[in-house]
Image: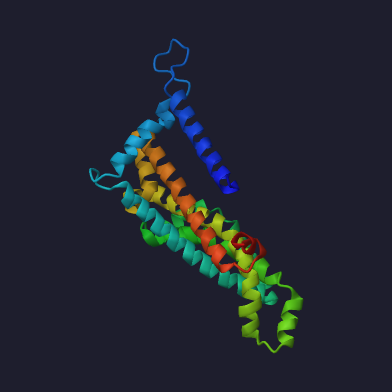
């Protein structure tokens, strides 16, 4: 058995144990005279069997707004916010990383804006952009931009000076140095920020959906609706779906990273 197969086997075993224990403990009556008291009260976290039934129902065509429509809305907003945040953060990180004077001029403004709690920006963003797609994209951007910016900024500054001098000695111009030396070096730092960035982009989008209600759409709306009706099963369906979406997006980022950074030693070893 290969090492990857063993890892996957352990993952499945842990998942089965967690779901089995969850189902069992929420179905056993506690030793008490109080009626309806369980070791783990299913009223608050539901049961895997009930969650599975609600998942099938919400994914069917019997509901006005299906689970797939809500998930698609969340994924669309997350990807837009992620793409915009990564692209702008990468460019800004490269520019300021190679321009020390400009970086020192803008440093207090960058620190001040990054220090603002993102949740505090939600009312301002919704006042300006409403509760639709644009507001959710902006909320995701405010998180992703700074994560990518700081990593790229450090990567652009950490480029080996000997490599730049060697490229200049061989006749490379500034554009060639940027394209062949600085950008590849900074990319390694940037990709280290992409996996947490996609997760935080998802968080920013869901926060916007929680406040936006049905107009915000998405799985955040399902969570809000579940809270209003005290429906733990529907809330867990939304949470499990968000977790699955996060896993799929992170795996996608890893695949892109392997392709773009195939020159790095760890990825050469994997291919070998």
Rendering quarter of residue 53: top left
Query: In the visual, does 242 lie left or right of 63?
Result: right
Q: Residue at x 39, y 54 (%)?
A: 74
Taking the view exactly as shown, the residue that stands out farthest to the top is 33
Quadrant placement of the C terminus: bottom right
Task: Give the colouring mode of the picture.
Answer: rainbow
Query: Residue 120 or 52: which is nearer the viewer?
Result: 52
Q: Residue at x 64, y 68 (%)?
A: 153
Q: Position of residue 14 (x, y in %)?
A: 53, 36
Frontmost residue, 171 versus 239:
171
Instruction: Choose between 141 and 179: the one closer to the eye.
Output: 179
Q: Where does residue 27 sit, x and y in percent of width and height?
A: 42, 22
Which residue is depicted at the point 51% across and 55% down?
251
Name the quadrant containing residue 169: bottom right
Of the 4 image quadrants, the one containing the N terminus is: top right
The answer to whether residue 109 of the structure is visible from this angle is no
- In the displayed structure, 164 sits above or below 220; it is below
Residue 76 percent coordinates (x, y): 39, 59
Q: How many numbered tags mark residues here?
A: 0
Kindly give the residue lying farthest to the bottom in the view shown.
171
């Amino acid at each position: 058995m290969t090492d990857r197969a063993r890892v996957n086997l352990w993952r499945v075993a842990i998942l089965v144990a967690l779901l089995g224990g969850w189902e069992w403990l929420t179905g056993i009556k506690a030793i008490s005279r109080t009626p309806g008291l369980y070791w783990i009260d299913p009223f608050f976290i539901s049961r895997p069997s009930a969650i599975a039934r609600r998942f099938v129902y919400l994914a069917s065509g019997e509901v006005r707004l299906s689970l797939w429509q809500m998930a698609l809305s969340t994924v669309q907003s997350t990807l837009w916010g992620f793409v915009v945040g990564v692209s702008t953060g990468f460019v800004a990180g490269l520019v300021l990383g190679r321009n020390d004077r400009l970086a020192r001029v803008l440093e207090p403004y960058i620190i001040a804006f990054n220090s603002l709690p993102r949740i505090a920006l939600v009312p301002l963003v919704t006042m300006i952009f409403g509760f639709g797609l644009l507001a959710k994209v902006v909320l995701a951007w405010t998180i992703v931009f700074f994560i990518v910016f700081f990593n790229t900024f450090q990567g652009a500054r950490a480029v080996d000076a000997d490599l730049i001098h060697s490229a200049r000695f061989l006749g490379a111009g500034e554009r060639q140095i940027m394209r062949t030396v600085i950008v590849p070096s900074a990319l390694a730092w940037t990709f280290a920020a992409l996996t947490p960035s996609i997760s935080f982009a998802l968080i920013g989008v869901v926060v916007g959906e929680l406040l936006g209600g049905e107009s915000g759409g998405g799985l955040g709306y399902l969570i809000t609706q579940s809270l209003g009706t005290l429906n733990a099963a529907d809330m867990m369906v939304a949470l499990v779906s968000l977790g699955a979406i996060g896993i799929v997006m992170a795996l996608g980022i890893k695949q892109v990273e392997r392709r773009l950074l195939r020159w790095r030693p760890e990825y050469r070893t994997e291919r070998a």
